[in-house]
Image (cartoon, rainbow, N blue to C red):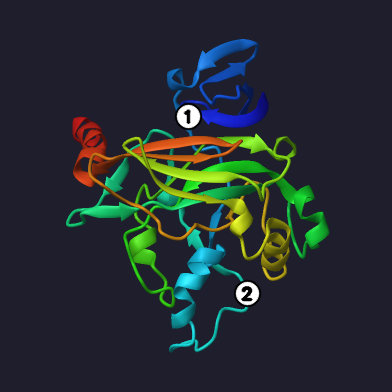
Amino acid sequence: MTRVNFKLQGFSQLKEGTLHDDFQKITIDEKQYNIDQLKFDNPITGTLYGTLLNYKGEYEQLKPEMNDKPYQKPPQAPVLYIKPINTLSTHQNPIPLPEGEEQVQVGAALGLVIGKTATKVKAEEAYEYIKGYTIVNDVSLPFSSYYRPAIKQKARDGFCPIGPWIINQNDIKDPHNLAIKVSINGEVKQENYTGNLIRPIPELVSEVTEFMTLYEGDVLLIGVPENQPLAKEGDQVSIEIEQVGRLNNRVVHEDNVFVSEVAVDEAR
């Protein structure tokens, strides 16, 4: 069994629990619950930073274009972006499909949850600054250019489900040997593993904190594998990362996602 931190809807503080190996049950305060009985909230408290081009397959696919304008050479440092607070969502929350769009792109990512202020961290000390690991679905609209900030594609409301929990860092023996699997409606659409990183976790943390500080509660994504699957309205999306858990969300047209909020506002 594995120790986890999580937040339940309606509660402001993180709670501790023990996750059973099948990801179906959790023990909280000596009581056992089925995962489906609980309504999880977003377990992170800081800023979420994504990393592009950190999987070897993704890098190789785009390598022929890297010498084109405007940069005319491969990136020399981690390529980062931010998923702003409006994107953050939770396990089992719907993924909004924007008006006029037919599909969203599923971005399965392991998230490093920072445990204390990290500035100019040495690679050999990186794990001292990682509190644990969580699953992130870095949802986006399909796009092809990595040379232009994809704000319109990646920063939509609800485009970043996270969770359901944070796995304690010490409970993952080798974070570079974790299988990643994306299923849509129960059918496996993507498989990869964290050993395919260009910059391993210690190197990534060191290079990022060389020029910017990461704070307690921030999350750094190690990257998203190549060949990201597409999901349409009504599709059930499941991201499973070995030893970490499963993150489940359904794609729903944005009008149906926000209808309850509108109804509440009109009733006031």
The quadrant the N terminus occupies is: top right
What is the number of callouts on the image? 2
- Taking 202 as reference, is 141 left or right? left
Q: Given contact means CB atoms under 8 Å apart, are the residues at marks 1 and 2 in contact?
A: no
> How many C-alpha atoms fall within 10 Å of the one at disc 1: few (<14), some, or many (≥20)?
many
Judging depth in this view, the residue of 227 and 246 nearest the camera is: 227
- Mark 1: which secondary structure? strand
Residue at image point 65% right, 47% down: 177
Residue position for label 2: 77
Amino acid residing under circle 2: Ala
Q: Nearer the viewer, residue 135 or 43?
A: 135
Observer-nearest of 66 and 217 = 66
**Relative horizontal placement of residue 170, taking residue 43 as reference (left or right):** right
> Is residue 52 at all visible to an observer of this figure?
no
Q: Which mark is residue 40?
A: 1
Q: Position of residue 124 (x, y in %)?
A: 82, 58
Q: Is residue 94 visible?
A: yes
For the C terminus, which image quadrant? top left
Q: Quadrant of residue 62?
A: bottom left
Nearer the N terminus, badge 1 or badge 2? Answer: 1
Residue located at (78% from left, 61% from top): 123
* Relative height, residue 221 to residue 182 (above, below): below
Q: Where residue 68 sits: x, y (%)?
A: 44, 88
Mark 2: give few (<14), some (14-19) or many (20+) Cα within 10 Å.
few
Q: Secondary structure at mark 2?
A: loop
In percent of the image, x 56 and y 48: which residue is there? 110
Identify the residue at the far top of this view. 31
Mark-to-mark CA distance, 1 and 2: 35 Å
Q: Is residue 201 above or below residue 77?
A: above
Q: Quadrant of residue 3?
A: top right
Q: Amino acid at mark 1?
A: Phe
